[in-house]
């Protein structure tokens, strides 16, 4: 009889593994916790994309808003862009962070695909991105009216991400607008 | 209309698969011969219908039918025809349909090519394979419909097949991989049929073995092509990354390798039955697990398809039914008491047992590393990634441990051998291996200990095989008769082991001796690498069927003699605007020269350029090809063909007697 019990060992191990896999389906491996959660948006001194106008932290805080890290070299950013346009048209403030990009290409991109941003910060050398802890593009940060980072989303923002993840936090922070 | 026809065919194919699962099995249970004999017919019907479905999907791609969402999302009018056909399975839904089709073809192959199987056993095998087909076809129809329409509002133009997939490797790598994955369902079905029938004997192993070897051979080719494709497609010369999706194909291969060796013992000596059944279940389970990992979103990978928890739940339930059910059956029906036939610790059986243990441990270490991020996340332990340092640290020593015994194995006798005989047989191979290990690395100039060790192990393998060949041929009265007398499966073993030796040398040599330089170069400049001079001649714009590119031209010279022209490209694909690097490679048996372009730098025409010198990298892939050839040799073995005739004769005799 003990010999027979040993034969159940693979089944037991599989049941344990299946439990972990089931749990894994509920997790998001792309959810990368940000060290900046509940910390102020980092200070910076850069220019607005497409102009020589200086922009600093004080110029972009004061309302609940999304900060979207994007670049023309980023394929997923193109996928995401139409939905950002939709959010912007519905009244959600979005600030762009144009990350390690070519200014002319970026301006052309916005002219061609539409500009969802209140303004885009030209982060040519990636300094602001480094301070934010940017993992790649696209990334989106939810920042409250006091300029504190509340959430970071790595990857494409689409309707599912907005309705299930970002919108609840946005509303809780007092954010207005958004697709009905 | 074509998409609807394809969808309908898929639905009826599923119905046929359900019938294949139930009707012959019912016949077996009730002793109804007519119902049992429906198996092959149902398998044929199922296969034809799923093939029709796949053909309809392919036609939709070829005809640019953008009303089909899959076509609109993965193809466009500019895409060359061959890549439109690749786009059929370069996505989740199409690849699942391809998986299902290949599974059906394997089922049909078993139905057609197994006349020697007792009817009741064949029925059980087909029934198990039918049930697996039910799972895959249901998954496709209910969660991943490839024929979903975009009506109304048909797009005028489609998106693009990922440019990484627009490559000849895409034509053959996934199909070969799927043939390997699905092929292990045959070994699985044979194991389950044996458990159901309570018959685990040499005959079962003999029936199962050619199917398993062929599936393993296809998987070897699929993995090899994936490695080779990554090497020339990604532009930085890497050929293996221990990416979760790569691991998903490697784990069934490792388990499959143990399985084919364990089958040899079961067939030859009636031993290792529990091992063999468990490994058959394990190899196919890992194929299913790989499918789960790639398509459920529980892990991140550059290869994985988009996340979809609904699909993940389905596959997990399917996995639970197949693996949980088979392991339960194993626990209840596998031999609980060890066979009364014994063997000495100094014997071929012991070496093959060690082989099983090493490959099982290797498989489990890769599985653990692949799933570790998930385990830690599930336990609330934070986010982790597991990369090459872990895998290399655990996998390389295991393989190094394995090879010494691979050298002894073929020379060993079954049941009982002696250390004195081993010593006598192996002294010459060992001496030859040591001589090679000491001298061959010197050819490259700088002596490298790792390369010396690799040459020692590979040489030990090769000379051990040579010794065994010599012994076997020498027992015959003359050379020609000796050669002819050796069975095809023996030659298969020899070729496969030689392939493994070549892989060892290739992997270690290219890991240790490769040189790469990241440079800023402009036309007119020359750089030297490993004795080769790379002269950057010019950059010119070129136009492809669906892309535009900057193409550089390099002339490579060595000691004043022309070696190669290399023309790497920086491409922009028109449909989606993606930028891709196309590396240029001068291949060689003993070295590859490799150039990839980065970005333009500044305004003076300079480019970031990466130059590579990669010695013996081809030996890895040639070694894998040899392993596959060895696997295919089993099918040619007379033993398996004559068995069919003798069983048939036996059946006829029984009929006459009746």
Image (cartoon, coloured by chain):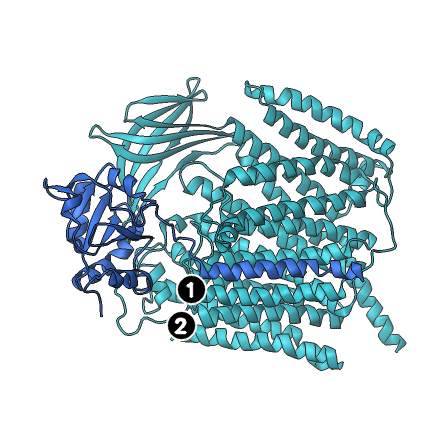
Chain colours: A blue, B cyan
Compared with B619, B31 (above or below) is below
Q: Residues within 10 Å of mark 1 (few under 14, many from 20)?
A: many
> What residue is disc 2 on?
B3
The residue under the point 60% across, 27% down is B450
Q: Residue reaching furthest right?
A: B657
The spot of residue B283 in percent (x, y) is: 63, 55
Compared with B423, A136 (above or below) is below
Name the one closer to the observer, B528 or A140: A140
**Disc 1 is attached to a residue of which chain?**
B
The residue under the point 17% across, 51% down is A110
Query: Quadrant of residue B402 in the image?
Result: top right
Q: Quadrant of the N terminus of chain B?
A: bottom left
Q: Quadrant of the C terminus of chain B?
A: bottom right
The spot of residue B190 in percent (x, y) is: 70, 63
Q: Who comes first in sequence, dot 1 or dot 2? A: 2
Name the one closer to the observer, B209 or B563: B209
Q: Residues within 10 Å of mark 2 (few under 14, many from 20)?
A: many
Real-space CA distance between mark 1 and mark 2, rounded to the nearest whole angstrom: 10 Å
Q: What SS does tag 2 mark? A: helix
């Amino acid at each position: 009889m003990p010999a027979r019990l040993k034969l159940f060992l693979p089944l037991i191990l599989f049941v344990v593994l299946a439990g972990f896999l089931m749990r894994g389906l509920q997790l998001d491996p792309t959810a990368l916790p940000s060290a900046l959660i509940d910390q102020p948006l980092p200070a910076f001194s850069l220019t607005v994309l497409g102009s020589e106008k200086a922009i600093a932290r004080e110029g972009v805080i004061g309302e609940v808003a999304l900060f979207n890290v994007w670049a023309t070299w980023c394929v997923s950013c193109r996928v995401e862009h139409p939905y950002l346009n939709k959010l912007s048209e519905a009244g959600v403030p979005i600030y762009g962070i144009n990350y390690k990009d070519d200014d002319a290409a970026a301006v052309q991109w916005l002219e061609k695909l539409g500009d969802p941003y209140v303004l885009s910060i030209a982060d040519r050398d990636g300094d602001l991105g480094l301070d934010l802890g940017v993992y790649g593009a696209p990334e989106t940060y939810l920042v409250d009216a006091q300029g504190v980072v509340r959430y970071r989303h790595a990857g494409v923002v689409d309707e599912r991400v907005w309705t299930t993840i970002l919108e609840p936090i946005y509303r809780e922070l007092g954010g207005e607008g958004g697709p009905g | 209309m074509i998409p609807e026809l394809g969808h309908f065919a898929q639905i009826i194919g599923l119905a046929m698969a359900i019938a294949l699962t139930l009707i012959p099995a019912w016949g077996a249970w009730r002793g109804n011969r007519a119902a049992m004999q429906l198996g092959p017919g149902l398998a044929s019907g199922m296969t034809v219908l799923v093939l029709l479905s796949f053909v309809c999907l392919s036609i939709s791609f070829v005809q640019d039918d953008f009303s089909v969402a899959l076509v609109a999302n993965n193809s466009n009018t500019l895409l060359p025809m061959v890549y439109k056909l690749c786009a059929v399975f370069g996505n989740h839904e199409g690849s699942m349909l391809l998986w299902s089709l290949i599974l059906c073809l394997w089922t049909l192959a078993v139905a057609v090519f197994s006349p020697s199987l007792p009817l009741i056993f064949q029925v059980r095998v087909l029934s198990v394979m039918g049930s697996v087909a039910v799972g895959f076809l249901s998954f496709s129809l209910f969660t991943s419909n490839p024929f979903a329409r975009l009506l109304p509002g048909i797009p005028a133009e489609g998106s693009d097949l990922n440019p990484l997939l627009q490559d000849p490797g895409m034509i053959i790598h996934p199909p070969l991989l799927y043939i390997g994955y699905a092929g292990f369902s045959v070994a699985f079905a044979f194991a389950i049929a044996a458990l159901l029938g309570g018959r685990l004997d040499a005959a079962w192993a003999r029936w199962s073995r050619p199917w398993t070897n062929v599936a393993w051979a296809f998987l070897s080719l699929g993995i090899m092509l994936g490695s080779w494709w990554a090497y020339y497609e990604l532009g930085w010369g890497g050929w293996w990354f221990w990416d979760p999706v790569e691991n998903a194909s490697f784990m069934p291969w490792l388990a499959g390798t143990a399985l084919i060796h364990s089958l040899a013992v079961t067939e030859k000596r009636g031993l290792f039955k529990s091992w063999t059944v468990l490994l058959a279940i394990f190899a196919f389970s890992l194929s299913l697990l790989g499918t789960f990992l790639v398509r459920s979103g529980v892990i991140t990978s550059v290869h994985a398809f988009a996340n979809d928890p609904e699909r993940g739940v389905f596959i997990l339930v399917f996995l639970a039914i197949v693996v949980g059910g088979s392991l339960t059956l194993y626990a209840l029906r596998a031999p609980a008491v060890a066979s009364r036939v014994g063997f000495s610790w100094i014997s071929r059986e012991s070496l093959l047992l060690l082989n099983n243990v090493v490959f099982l441990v290797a498989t489990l270490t890769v599985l653990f590393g692949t799933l570790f991020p998930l385990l830690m996340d599930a336990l609330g332990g934070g986010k982790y990634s597991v990369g090459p340092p872990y895998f290399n640290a655990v996998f390389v020593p295991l393989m190094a441990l394995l090879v010494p015994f691979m050298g002894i194995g073929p020379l060993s006798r079954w049941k009982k051998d002696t250390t004195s005989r081993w010593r006598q047989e192996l002294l010459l191979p060992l001496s030859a291996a040591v001589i090679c290990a000491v001298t061959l690395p010197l050819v490259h100039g700088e002596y490298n200990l790792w390369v010396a060790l690799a040459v020692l192990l590979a040489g030990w393998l090769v000379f051990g095989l040579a010794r065994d060949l010599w012994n076997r041929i020498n027992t015959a009265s003359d050379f020609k008769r000796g050669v002819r007398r050796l069975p095809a499966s023996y030659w298969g073993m020899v070729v496969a082991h030689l392939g493994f030796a070549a892989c060892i040398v290739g992997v270690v040599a290219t890991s240790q001796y490769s040189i790469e330089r990241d440079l800023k170069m402009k036309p007119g400049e020359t750089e030297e690498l490993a004795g080769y001079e790379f002269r950057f001649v010019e950059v010119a714009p070129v136009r492809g069927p669906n892309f535009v590119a900057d193409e550089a031209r390099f002339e490579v010279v060595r000691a004043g003699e022309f070696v190669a022209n290399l023309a790497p490209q920086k491409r922009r694909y028109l449909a989606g605007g993606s930028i891709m690097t196309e590396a240029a490679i001068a291949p060689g048996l003993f070295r590859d020269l490799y150039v990839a372009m980065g970005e333009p730098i500044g305004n003076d025409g300079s480019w970031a350029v990466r130059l590579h010198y990669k010695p013996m990298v081809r030996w890895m892939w040639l070694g894998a090809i040899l392993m596959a050839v060895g696997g295919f040799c089993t099918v040619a073995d007379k033993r398996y063909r004559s068995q069919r005739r003798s069983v048939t004769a036996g059946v006829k005799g029984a009929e006459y007697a009746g």
